Image (spheres, helix red, strand yellow):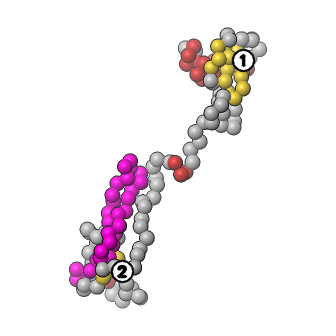
Amino acid sequence: MASGNGYAVGVEVDGVRYPSARAADLALGLPPNTVCHRAHSRNYPTYRWLGETPGRRPVRKPEDCAVGRPLAEPERWPYDGGARRAPVMDPNFDPPRLVRRVGWLRCMTCGRPHFSEDVARVRLCCTCGGLGGLPIGADPDGDL
Ligand SMILES: [Zn+2]
């Protein structure tokens, strides 16, 4: 039985100690909740609650969840002529999986450098139709 603060409560049955009422149920081959019920009952004086068992129960926090973690997306960096390729990793796999690589490329149509979110698949700048493209003239600073 949990005590409400994250600790299991030990129980003693006929002089034998168990770390929890459920552990006693399993060890004695009793149905679930039997030891818990008997320890609360006056009809079973040899079943008694002990103090809290040391050792905290693991509490799940968002940081140690195994799934649903966002991709590790690298920050965009200033133009380097296409020297650097940075990996985008998916941390939901162990070991983390490579999703794609980002970096600076020259557009295959107009030749202008642009930052590609996937250097293997997105090889046109947005103006020329990369990533679905932008309407002509919709890119105000022209660096996409
Ligand atoms: Zn282009």
In the rendered image, the quadrant that contains the N terminus is top right
Badge 2 amino acid: Tyr
Residue 70 shows in the view: yes
Magenta residues, start to end? 82-109
Q: Position of residue 81 (x, y in %)?
A: 30, 80
Residue at x 70% of width, y 15% of height:
47
Residue 33 shows in the view: no
Task: Name the mark on residue 48.
Answer: 1
Q: Residues within 10 Å of mark 1 (few under 14, many from 20)?
A: many
Between label 1 and label 2, give the one nearer the viewer: 2
Q: Whole-Å distance between the Cαs marked 1 and 2?
A: 72 Å
Residue at x 55% of width, y 14% of height:
29
Task: Name the mark on residue 79.
Answer: 2
What residue occupies the far right of the structure in this picture? 42
Q: Nearer the viewer, residue 31 or 68?
A: 68
Q: Nearer the viewer, residue 74 or 80?
A: 80
Q: Position of residue 65 (x, y in %)?
A: 50, 48
Task: Please check the rendered image and state whether residue 10 is part of the magenta-colored stretch, yes or no.
Answer: no
Above or below, comparing residue 99 to residue 29 in the picture: below
